[in-house]
Image (cartoon, helix red, strand yellow):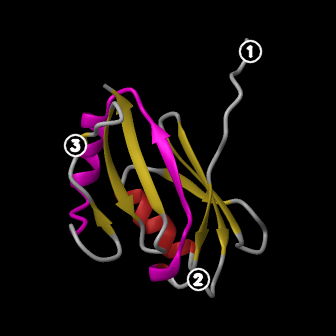
Amino acid sequence: MTTADIAIPLLPSRSMADTLRFYQQLGFSGDVVSPHGEYAIFKRGALEIHFFLHTTLIPAESAFGCYCRVQDVDNIYTAFRQADLPLHGIPRITALENKPWGMREFAVIDADGSLLRIGQVL
């Protein structure tokens, strides 16, 4: 069996415990994988995101982010909305929209200010 080449986003976490709780609300599972608590791996289906400890990060100033291209954005949006994230501030979730660049997408800003855009080709 061959595997496709993939890129895995690496995002900051001010607190691995808080990051784990946040992403569990979105349906991810995973754990801290380093002996000193500075690295974690979370998965949700085929999506995989890695996190590194960055205790001095200021969420409002974060420029970290990633794009997750998925097969069923509507299903993921419905699942993420169950986390009751606010529509403004940090963290937050945006509306699901068809974009002029040919994607149906929404965004989540996590508690550390990282932007996750989740989309599907129209």
Q: Are marks 1 and 2 in contact (CB under 8 Å)?
A: no
* The stretch drawn in magenta includes residue 15: no
| Residue 45 against residue 83 in the figure, above or below | above
Where, by quadrant of the figure, is residue 88 drawn? bottom left
User: For numbered disc 1, what is the local secondary structure?
Assistant: loop
Q: Amino acid at mark 3?
A: Glu
Viewer-closest of 102 and 59: 102
Q: Label 3 belongs to which residue?
A: 97
Q: Amino acid type of disc 2?
A: Leu
Which x, y percent locates residue 42? 56, 52
Q: Which residue is mark 1?
A: 2
Position of residue 3 measured from the top left corner of the image (x, y, whole percent): 71, 21
Specify the farthest residue to the right: 35
Name the quarter where the C terminus is drawn.
top left
Q: Residue type at mark 1: give it.
A: Thr
Q: Where does label 2 land, which residue?
A: 57
Which residues make up the magenta segment?
60-86
Residue at the far front in the pictured view: 100
Measuring from the top left, give residue 119's x and y in whole percent.
37, 38
Q: Position of residue 56 (x, y in %)?
A: 63, 88
Q: Is residue 79 magenta?
A: yes
Q: Mark 3 packing: few (<14 Cα in 10 Å), some, or many (20+)?
A: few
Tell me the distance, in whole angstroms, between the alpha carbons under discs 1 and 2: 38 Å
Vertical placement of 110 versus 56: above or below? above
